[in-house]
Image (cartoon, rainbow, N blue to C red):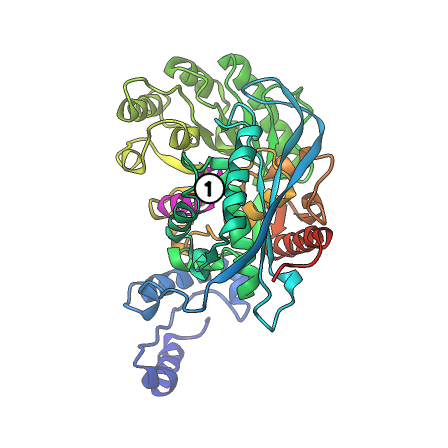
Amino acid sequence: KKKSPRLGETIARRMAASEGAASGAAPRVVSVPDAGHALVEERPRDVADALAAAVRHLAAKPSSMDRPAPPVSAPAVRLARVWAEALEVALKEPVMLSRGDAMPRRSGLLVVMQAGAEEPHMGAAKLVGVGEINPLPRFHKESLAEAGAQLNQVLQAWATDPPTIPLDLLRLDGAMSRWLAEHCSCLPEPLLPSVRCGLEMAVLHLLGRVTQTPILSGVAANARGVGCASCIGINSLIAREEELRGPSDGAVVVKVKVGREPTQDSQRINTVADILRARRGPDARLRLDANQAWDIDEAAEFLKGLSDSTVAMTEYLEEPVRWNALGPEAFLQDWETLAARTERRVRFALDESLTEQDLGTHHVDQCGASVAAVVLKPALQGMEQTMSLAAWAIARGSRPVVSSAFESGVALAHFAILAAAMTPPLWQTEDTVSACHGLGTFARLAEDVLDPPFEDLVLERRPCGGWHVDALRCQEALDRTADALVAMQGPTPR
């Protein structure tokens, strides 16, 4: 408001006499000087700060929402049948990964789960969910053949004794892991990561359709006490082996693989930064990934070779140094040493050290180096564990970033929906790390099994808004794809 404080006092008294008095709440009037009636347009930061302060104030008060939600009381869903379909998608051109040979295509499995048609208000064709099992060679420990063999064991056991699926598995609060452990007890070894992820996807999709949940991950977000967005941003990817042709069109945030000769890599990144800034303006951002390729000296040489303008654009460097054989504490001490030697020019991010080495969240909580982001791979960690790590990251002030591994659009749609449930509270938002997720591998797919293809769901927001995808559109595409798979199978057994 622009007028005298007396007007604010009058408004406050009238509010207290009406709504405030009835609820016992004390109204708060914030005065914003030198602004007229278009307050939001004239003073957006002041308005945002005032709203954030109000939310913090309300969040600090005891509320029925602070208590854990009770388990869903509705009966569990009976699984009528589950089967697998072969999956193969070509890439637009072979991709050279940081490990192994060039990869021209991706092969995997789709898991389709269909429930019985007991619910009279829904047709049988709608009681179906789909997930994807797609281990990436040299990144997953298991091969596709090993994943397929384990999945077949599970499917055979479930064909003999179909399990029921409790609706509270949607909460992703540990119940999913317990349910899988109980109903996959036929296996002589634990579930392989890619198999676990695919089964979790199919279960979540099926239960979401049965309960008609608007956004599949919304229940999990509520259970974990984090926000849920309807739309997420996506960064693009420049692989280490590629010729520099400039960042992908449409993306404002670009991830670049580094980890070779430090001086050459820093020069290359400076060039990429100049191109990106020229194309996308001041909103352009870089994310760098060394995949633990360097020792401390090499990583320091790389960071010192970055120009000041490149550093200003860089959100973080993933896994800058090799794993230390002495253990997690020594590994994180190397991070602290590197940060000190480079005057903390660039913040770091966690990735494979959380999944491939013996690094726990309790170790990270003791780390003196700034952890800007935690990169999460559901294909390795599973959907439920990914959600748990995301909640931990948000609580410690790091940005959770969901990352794909050249899966088809089925997995990408699931990952986008899951990422939507990783929205930090307004007052915890880290301005130096954008809310973009690592799903830009969609741009490498020459074909897709998702209907419509994931690439068709990605939009570019202008001006300079970058790639975005809507979680509801992803959910609709999964529904359509699952229904088509059911139609090819024929009637549901009763």
Q: Which residues are magenta?
A: 376-393
Secondary structure of residue under mark 1? loop
What residue would you read off at disc 1? 382
Question: 424 or 224, which is in the foreground?
Answer: 224
Give above or below for 157 relative to 302. below
In the rendered view, does 318 fall on the left or right side of 269?
left
Query: Can residue 434 be seen?
Result: no
Residue 102 lies, in percent from the top left, at: 64, 20
Say which amino acid is labelled 1.
Answer: Gly
Outermost residue, front side: 160
Location of residue 237 (image quadrant): top right
Q: Is residue 269 above or below residue 375?
A: above
- Left or right: 410, with 355 as reference point: right
The image shows residue 274 at horizontal and vertical percentages of 61, 27
Viewer-proximal residue among 71 and 216: 71
In the picture shown, does residue 124 fall above or below 465?
below
Residue at 31 percent of width and 77 percent of height: 26
> Is residue 458 placed above or below 193 in the rendered structure?
below
Quarter where residue 46 is shown: bottom left
Q: Is any part of residue 487 visible from this angle?
A: yes
Dominant secondary structure of the magenta stretch? helix
